[in-house]
Amino acid sequence: MTRLIITGSLCSLSLLCQLGVASQDDTGFDFLREKASLETCCPDDAVRNAEALAKFAEVSSNILSSGKLSDEDASKLLRVLEIDPGARLPLAMLMAHWLEKNQAQKLLDGLLPIAEKNPHVDSLALALALAYAQLDRDDDAIAMIERTLDAIGGLDDYGYGVNYVELVIHLAELYSEKEDFLKGEELFDEALGNESLKDNFKLRRAAFMFFSKKAEDRPFSLFSGRLERRFHRKMLDSFAVVERIWLDDLVGDGDSSGEAKNTRSIELAPMVEICKKFGLVDRIENLILEKLLDTPRSAESRVMLAALFQDIGRFASARRMWKRLSDESKSNHRFFTEYGRSAMASRKFDEAIRAFEWAEFISAPARKDASSYMTALAYMNAGMLDKAISKFDKLGKMPEAHYFKALSLRRLGKDLEAAKSLDEAEKAAKENGDEEFLSQDFYMYLAFTNDRAKRFDRALEVLKQLYKDHSDEHEVCNFLGYFLADHDMELELAAEALDKAITAEPDNGAYLDSMAWLHYRRKNFEKAYKYIVKAIGNLENDPDAVVYDHAGDICKALGRTEDAVKYWRIASEIFSEDTDPLAIIEKIRKAGG
């Protein structure tokens, strides 16, 4: 019997090595070696072990010949797990078979009976957690992991390793999604209280991220903010341990229990945004720099540092790092794209253009349009508007390309063509189902451009729809109200909209000017004068030619010619694309000024 077990084990191992699943020293074969080494065991166990290994050998042979795992083979692997619930390789094969085919329910149906009989087996719990996640059954996942952790807690000889850490992290994420932060806190307090886990890098990183979700650096108060302050303290405590593990590893003083040996810089990536939020950027930057000093040729550390510099707005530093990475790897599309982005943010447009043009040249077909779009943006920002427009023209399916083409056309004074390009942007976004692109800001700009292009009916159509959809947005209310007042039409609707805008921001100089102009159109000149004077006062630090032009017209209507000329002179001296200086000068001349 023992000879059969050994033969089956070696056969299975040999076949799977041929399949490329693992190497001869792969720890995934622990269960095979363990059974193969059983020189003496009770007869029942020997029979069961022989059955397990025979089935595993048969499945391995079938995979080698057919190149896939059949449902019949899956049933045999389930039998192996019934005999040895901790067998990792058969479990991994089942997960690959069912989860990759989005058949999570089959995995659940197969594993749940085994897990219920063996609640302490962490590998089964992890597999079931993944299946539950694929089915969006978070409550079931929580209950299952909690049962497993309780069962593990009752064991005297459990080795707290990778699987336990992954279970804790996954359960904490589920608690966070449910906003059950107190349970998550209790979970981490218990896990980190374990002597063998208190310096575990992944667990400490997860704790840092979990506690950050409710952490606030609040001043002390007896009545509020206790949880937020406590979470802030625990977040910082975990970050300090992460720092110590990381730096000790670099200088060779790390404890193996910290599991930071050979940790890659990318492991810090999930922490970067949180560090930015809580003012820890210098500390995370220091960790990446220390790693870079330890492995100066590591592209990964330099990529991390370049990305961090870019995220925090240090574009000149980011540009230098991305340039060096690009120079070392002429075929890396990402390096050239990020080099172009940082160069553009640094206003080094010539560099940005060269970087994006090269990225476009080396890009795969699937990335070609995105690379071409970035090149067109660089042309636009460099003032090469005709080249930008030509490039955007070739990206007809991208609403963003039509939008930026419109911006380029407006810079050339081609308002009508710009308005038409924005119509194309709207059409492309609707065809793509891109609701995010069709935002309030987009439609505000669409209305503005159509107004500038003297397509007044189209501008009014857009503004009325905006008002219908966003009647509580004061910017929308002011735009519609002013447009109607300026065109001397539907003044009742204008009054309704402007009343909402003024109520929302009673001291907004632009809104006060709009209301003044509405009263002017209604020939309520005294009311118009009160509003325009207040508008001028509130815009003292940011004078607007339109407001002063309106003030002149209102004063003229009141017979205050001297004041009118004064305001018109000020308006004529302020640059604005919304006023006509020659027309204002003509008004001054006619008034005898």
Image: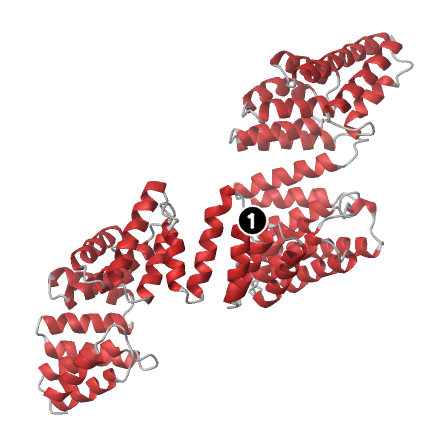
- When asked about the image quadrant of residue 473, the answer is bottom left
Helix, strand or loop at label 1? It is helix
Q: Nearer the viewer, residue 454 or 327?
A: 327
Question: What residue is shown at x 58% (from left), y 26% (from top)?
Answer: 99
- When asked about the image quadrant of residue 85, the answer is top right
Residue 271, position in %: x, y? 62, 53
Q: Nearer the viewer, residue 16 or 474?
A: 16
The quadrant of the picture occupied by the N terminus is: top right
Q: Is residue 445 left or right of residue 274?
A: left
Q: Is residue 202 above or below residue 112?
A: below
Q: Count neighbours of disc 1 (C-alpha within 10 A) and say few if under 14, some if 14 to 19, many if 20 or more.
A: some
Q: Is residue 591 left or right of residue 22?
A: left
Q: Is residue 277 visible?
A: no
Residue at the far right: name it.
39
Q: Is residue 592 above or below residue 534?
A: below
**Residue where numbered disc 1 is placed:** 362
Residue 276, position in %: x, y? 58, 60
Question: What residue is shown at x 71% (from left), y 57% (from top)?
Answer: 240
Residue 550, position in %: x, y? 18, 78
The quadrant of the picture occupied by the C terminus is: bottom left
Q: Is residue 230 visible?
A: yes
Q: Is residue 572 left or right of residue 411?
A: left
Residue 409, position in %: x, y? 32, 62
Q: Is residue 319 left or right of residue 57?
A: left
Q: Nearer the viewer, residue 113 or 288?
A: 288
Tell me the kind of residue under disc 1: Ile
